[in-house]
Image: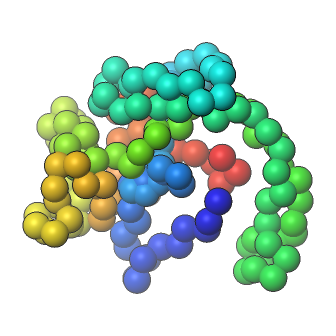
Amino acid sequence: MRRIRKSKGGKHVALATVACLVSVTVLGGCGGGGGGGGTPGETKTNPTDGAELIWIPAGTFTMGEVTGYSDEQPVHQQTVSGFWLYRKEVTNAQYGQFMQATGHEAPYYWNDSTLNGAQQPAVGVNWFDAKAYAEWAGSRLPTEAE
């Protein structure tokens, strides 16, 4: 997985998946990662926002970077439990449902015609916005290892 950094000024992050991130990476199922296990590649639908989730099986991988930044070291083996992950980024249409249901304010680029198509990834959100969306959807944001 690639490392995702904050944009200029550290103000805006995309809601996504790290496959999904972007836009917001969201883990699915009751409490994220919860909602019961699955089989590799199995999919299901989040009843709150209609997102498709895919089961990511448990595994161990090498985490870190020998020549990277200091916060990417030391290189070590990391094991993660299986979890449900949004298969695609959270779209503007889904984020709009969230704003309508909760009264949450619009993200920074909401009115930018080059970025606000209904099926485009929601962008211009910060970590708190992404966390609020994930909680509304009955999920959570992934850990760094996930």
The residue lying toward the viewer, choosing from 132 and 122, is 122
Instruction: Write down the quadrant of residue 12 in the picture.
Output: bottom left
Q: Pick out the residue farthest to the top.
A: 36
Tell how many labels.
Answer: 0
The residue lying toward the viewer, choosing from 30 and 66, is 66
Image point (20%, 65%), residue name: 115
The residue lying toward the viewer, choosing from 27 and 20, is 20
Q: Pick out the residue farthest to the front.
A: 41
Image point (73%, 80%), residue name: 69
Is residue 81 toward the left or the right of residue 105 in the image?
Answer: right
Query: Where residue 112 sits in the image (x, y, percent)?
Result: 13, 68
Query: Where residue 34 sits in the image (x, y, percent)?
Result: 59, 23
Whether residue 131 appears in this view of the structure is no
Instruction: Write down the quadrant of residue 45 in the picture.
Output: top left
Image point (66%, 22%), residue name: 39
Whether residue 67 appears in this view of the structure is yes
Position of residue 52 relative to residue 30, above or below, is: below
Is residue 144 toward the left or the right of residue 129 in the image?
Answer: right
Position of residue 133 relative to residue 124, above or below, is: above
Position of the N terminus, as image quadrant, is: bottom right
Query: Where residue 62 sits in the image (x, y, percent)?
Result: 84, 57
Query: Where residue 71 sits in the image (x, y, percent)?
Result: 74, 73
Is residue 86 toward the left or the right of residue 109 in the image?
Answer: right
Is residue 24 toward the left or the right of residue 83 in the image?
Answer: left
